[in-house]
């Protein structure tokens, strides 16, 4: 990756292009809202237009040296600026785009910002690779990225877990049960939808699209497939029975 804000003169770009061509390595021109060249910053500030102009300017520098194996990214910590940048770049060029919201912050806020920014672009058909930037263990970034791809319908491998909010009909301790199911599904790669529902009255019907699910009752619960009840089981055995059936799928 090169940073337009500090690569310097065309002679530096030439040295880079020669090296890239020699080793057959692509390059990402990565513009952050804080790394725009001074002249463009004076003209546009840290706007979407400024970031895109900076990225395309440096792409033209590399093209001048006969190199065009280029990926662009225009990331801001501001979600709206990020989305506007990629939408503008998508209109102006056909380079691959590496999408992400930079410096998104701690996991709770950062995942929300990334889901909105990256997700809205993916739903527009914009983006070739993604990066979730969290102030956390990088493993959490990968889990978040997979969840965004799954929610956008672009990742088929892995479980889609759905769970209802608690309400007056909830007859089980739903939140810990859903958390246990999520934890035990973490390494499952089956392309299935699993439901954890709070009541037996509406649960199987509301989650009829799920491949398999459980619904709580007073002291017992239901195991169901595609909305059809498989059997009643004691409440304490619900999760184990669910995973026994998942193994059979």
Image (spheres, helix red, strand yellow):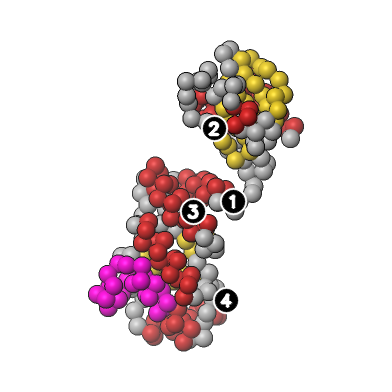
Side of 160 relative to 37 (left or right): right
Callout 3: 10 Å neighbours few (<14), some, many (20+)?
A: many
Viewer-proximal residue among 159 and 133 = 159
Corner quadrant of residue 199 = top right
Dot 2 corresponds to which residue? 163
Callout 2: 10 Å neighbours few (<14), some, many (20+)?
A: some
Q: In the structure shown, which secondary structural element does the residue marked by tag 4 occupy?
A: loop
The image shows residue 73 at horizontal and vertical percentages of: 44, 66
Nearest to the eye among marks 4 and 2: give it: 2
Query: How far separated are the C-alphas under marks 2 and 1?
Result: 18 Å
Callout 1: 10 Å neighbours few (<14), some, many (20+)?
A: few
Residue drawn at the location 35% of the way across and 83% of the way down: 9
Dot 4 corresponds to which residue? 24
Query: How far separated are the C-alphas under marks 3 and 1?
Result: 10 Å
Corner quadrant of residue 46 = bottom left
Query: N-terminal of the two: label 1 or label 4?
Result: 4
Highlighted range, magenta: 35-58
Q: In the structure shown, which secondary structural element does the residue marked by tag 1 occupy?
A: loop
Query: N-terminal of the two: label 3 or label 2?
Result: 3
Dot 3 corresponds to which residue? 119
Q: In the structure shown, which secondary structural element does the residue marked by tag 3 occupy?
A: helix
- Residue 161 vs 77, above or below: the answer is above
Q: Does residue 67 show up?
A: yes
Dot 1 corresponds to which residue? 153
The image shows residue 43 at horizontal and vertical percentages of: 27, 76
């Amino acid at each position: 990756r090169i940073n337009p804000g500090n690569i310097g003169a065309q002679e530096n770009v030439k040295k880079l292009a020669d090296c890239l061509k020699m080793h057959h390595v692509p390059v990402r021109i990565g513009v952050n809202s804080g790394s725009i060249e001074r002249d463009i910053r004076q003209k546009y500030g840290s706007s979407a237009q400024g970031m895109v102009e900076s990225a395309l300017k440096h792409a033209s520098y590399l093209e001048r040296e006969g190199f065009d194996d280029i990926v662009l990214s225009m990331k801001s910590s501001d979600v709206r600026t990020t989305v506007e940048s990629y939408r503008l770049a998508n209109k102006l060029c056909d380079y691959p785009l590496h999408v992400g919201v930079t410096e998104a912050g701690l996991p709770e806020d950062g995942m929300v910002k990334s889901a909105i920014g990256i997700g809205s672009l993916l739903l527009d058909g914009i983006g070739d690779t993604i990066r979730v930037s969290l102030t956390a263990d990088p493993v959490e970034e990968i889990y978040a990225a997979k969840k965004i791809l799954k929610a956008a319908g672009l990742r088929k491998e892995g479980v889609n877990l759905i769970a209802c909010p608690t309400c007056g009909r909830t007859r089980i301790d739903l939140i810990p049960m859903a958390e246990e199911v999520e934890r035990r599904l973490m390494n499952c790669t089956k392309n299935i939808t699993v439901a954890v529902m709070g009541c037996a009255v509406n649960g199987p019907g509301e989650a009829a699209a799920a491949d398999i699910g459980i619904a709580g009752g007073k002291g017992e619960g239901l195991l169901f497939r595609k909305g059809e009840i498989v059997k009643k089981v004691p409440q304490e055995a619900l999760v184990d029975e669910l995973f026994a059936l998942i193994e059979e799928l």
